[in-house]
């Protein structure tokens, strides 16, 4: 009997998914309680990158931001990326002042522009060797 296919998260701990309880998907970050610096992912090393404080708290980041920079890639990279080609990748600046590296989805790449308002979504990146859908966060033009 074949194994049941399922969704697999690309990397645990990057976002929270509260949709089952009426909430939303939000990226997770960290804030230094001593200097106020905000980071776009939980700080695995447990130190503020600016003041070296260990006084960090986990926060949820905004689901909307603006494109800070982007490019459209027309050729598959040699190793790590297994999604469709061409693809658009870049940085989104969130209201908290952090920039998040991301793929862009659900759009015509010709319509992307710096300053465009975008929103967070979860999407399939590729299938793993077992046929499971590998899920990651991406941004799309805001509705």
Image: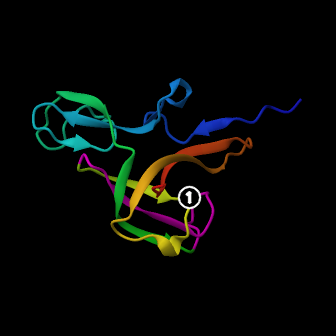
- At a point 48% along the width and 72% down the height, the residue shown is 111
Q: Position of residue 63 (x, y in %)?
A: 39, 44
Q: Is residue 7 above or below residue 81?
A: above
Q: Position of residue 20 (x, y in %)?
A: 56, 26
Our reading of the magenta stretch's main secondary structure is loop
Side of 43 relative to 116 (left or right): left
Q: Does the segment drawn in magenta span residue 21? A: no
Task: Give SS at disc 1.
Answer: loop
- At a point 30% along the width and 32% down the height, the residue shown is 59
Q: Which residue is mark 1?
A: 81
Q: Nearer the viewer, residue 92 or 30?
A: 92
The quarter of the picture where residue 39 lies is top left
Q: Nearer the viewer, residue 40 or 104?
A: 104
Number of other residues with Cα within 10 Å of mark 1, as a class: few under 14, some 14 to 19, many 20 or more: few
Side of 128 relative to 39 (left or right): right
In the image, farthest residue toward the top:
21
The span picked out in magenta is 75-96
In the image, farthest residue toward the right:
1
Side of 37 relative to 105 (left or right): left
Q: Position of residue 43 (x, y in %)?
A: 29, 36
- At a point 57% along the width and 73% down the height, the residue shown is 75
């Amino acid at each position: 009997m074949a194994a049941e296919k399922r969704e697999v998260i690309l990397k645990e701990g990057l976002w929270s998914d509260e949709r089952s309880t009426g909430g939303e998907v939000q990226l997770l970050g960290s804030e230094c309680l001593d200097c106020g610096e905000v980071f776009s992912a939980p700080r695995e090393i447990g130190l503020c990158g600016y003041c070296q404080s260990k006084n960090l708290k986990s926060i949820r980041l905004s689901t909307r931001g603006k494109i800070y920079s982007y490019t459209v890639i027309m050729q598959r990279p040699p190793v790590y990326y297994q999604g469709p080609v061409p693809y658009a990748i870049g940085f989104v600046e969130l209201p908290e002042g952090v920039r998040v590296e991301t793929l862009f989805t659900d759009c015509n790449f010709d319509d992307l522009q710096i300053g465009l308002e975008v929103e967070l979504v979860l999407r399939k990146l590729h299938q793993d060797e077992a046929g499971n859908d590998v899920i990651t966060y991406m941004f799309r033009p805001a509705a």
